[in-house]
Amino acid sequence: MKPRTAPTHRHRRSVSAWAPTAVLLLAMTTSCAGPGPVGGHAAAKPGAAGVGDRLFPTLGNGGYDVTHYGLTLDYTPQTNHLKGTAVITARATQDLSRFDLDLSGLRVRTATVQGSKAQFSRSGDELVVTPAKTLKNDEIFKTVVTYDGTPRTIKGDDGGLEGWIETDDGSTALGQPTGSMTWFPGNHHPSDKATFDIWVTVPRDEDGDFYDAVGNGELIAEEDKGGSMTRHWRTAEPMAGYLAHVSVGYFEIHKGRTHDRLPVYVAVDPDESADAGDVPHLVPEIVDWADGLFGPYPFSSTGAVVDHLPELGYALETQTKPYFAGAPDEALLVHELAHQWFGNSVTPRTWQDMWLSEGMATYAEWLWEEKRGGRSTDEIFEDFYDGTDDEAEGIWAFPPAAPPSGGRVSDPPVYGRGAMVVHKVRKAVGDDVFFDILRTWTRQHRHGNAGTRQFVTLCENASGKDLTELFDTWLFDKGKPSRM
């Protein structure tokens, strides 16, 4: 994610201090409470209502791992009404008597597990599902939930809007960090990634024209049903729930290819077409450039959605097609496309690891500016350190690897100081080793999750250097470091 302006606005933390977090995650995902269903296995336990993320402790769920979402959505822009069916394929990671799905708002009509009617109840943002029979450890099971209503727009702790957001000609679904639960039930912590098929049905408008519906991945099929149109979007590579996306409205569609023949799909709101005229050409140029620096592009297509939602105030790296609330400048476009490697393919293990996504994407902006004949990366670093860069305000508020709350995961230290950490690593190990580290990182963790400790270990192993002082000073310590 990248705000259009500088992001709105913890103690020293050594690498070994991350171990308790892993213990907490293990404990919460294997916790139990209450008896299983009648006829269930004696050892069966409920899945945890949350994975124990320090910043979002109730987000996600324990006891299972989702492998695929099949979402069938019927949306009427005139009334902002959504009708959905979610088919969730998952693998049980324990003998499971019941499990939770994250869902905010909307009315659940039915739920089945393995084809049999399941009991369900609501508690806050938790949909608690009790199957007719206990699910055995390692069992692949399918849950079907039907639901409808007016999906919510959430105002996050940082004041930003997320969830299902109405636009002047339709709506858009933006999920970082928790908004995806407003339009489909699931395991919405980034550590549980899955493939997606999304079918979106939209009606004709008052003039008899169909609304457009754009989603992640590739457009598999379009079906004209007379009074409505169904479009099928498929994401064949694993995706975190917060990166799932649907935009409904009117768009000018631009199709093309990168140098490596990768499909490019850019959707532009007509109100932004004059200012966004370069976007369809810049997307493949930036992807080709980044491919050479960061390793092979990790998905089977790329693109962008340029909407007209000026009050939103940020862009989001929705997988394969980053979302922009208005025509982006080059730096913003670079930032969100760089996230396809850092954040989307290699996704943070916990929200505390967010700097690995935002710091890397911000550093990609620095590299692009240097490529375009602007400031060098050394000069940009100095401008951030001295506070003269437009986005330097607030970067010393807390260490990048230790946001004090969920509402501050998008604050300046995560971006600007995160990029400074990346630059300090580059200066310490040299360019050849540094870019090898980036390519190794995206290769080793392609389509998976990774955390801060793994990155530190990779940097030290690849360089053969002890980088403890560097990371303690720039990543974990409070306050503005002295020059070193």
Image (cartoon, rainbow, N blue to C red):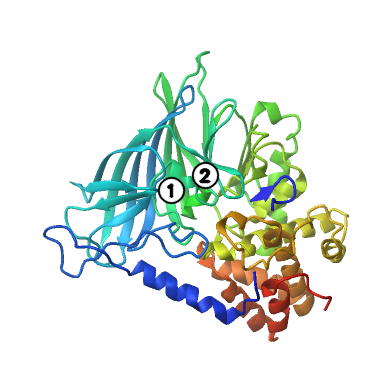
Q: Nearer the viewer, residue 60 or 346?
A: 60
Q: Which mark is residue 216?
A: 2
Q: Secondary structure at mark 2?
A: loop
Q: Identify the residue at image location x=78%, y=54%.
A: 391
The residue depicted at 68 percent of the width and 86 percent of the height is 464
Q: Where's the C terminus, which quadrant? A: bottom right
Q: Which mark is residue 381?
A: none
Which image quadrant is residue 76 in?
Answer: top left
Foreground residue among 210 and 93: 93
- Asked which quadrant contains residue 250, the reply is top right
- Residue lying at the far left in this picture: please name it: 39
Q: Tell me if 329 is positioned left or right of 325 in this view.
A: right
Across and down, in percent, residue 7 comes to 70, 51
Element under label 1? strand
- Report the residue at 58% width, 54% height from top: 407
Q: Earlier in the sequence, mark 2 or mark 1?
A: 1
Relative to 26, say whether 341 is above or below: above
Q: Is residue 285 visible?
A: no
Horizontal relation, residue 171 to residue 483: left or right: left
| Residue type at tag 1 | Phe
Residue 447 in sight: yes
Picture layout, residue 81 above or below residue 402: above
Q: Front-most of 300 and 174?
A: 174
Reading the image, the residue beneath label 1 is: 196
Vertical side of 108 occupied by 480: above or below: below
Instruction: Give the side of residue 393 with respect to residue 307, left or right.
Output: right
Tell me where residue 282 appears, x and y as whole percent: 73, 44
Q: What type is the residue that disc 2 sits on? A: Asn
Does the residue at mark 2 contact the one at mark 1 (Cβ under 8 Å)? yes
Which of the 4 quarters of the picture holds residue 413?
bottom right
Name the residue: 54% across, 64% down: 446
State the CA–CA distance, disc 2 to disc 1. Answer: 9 Å
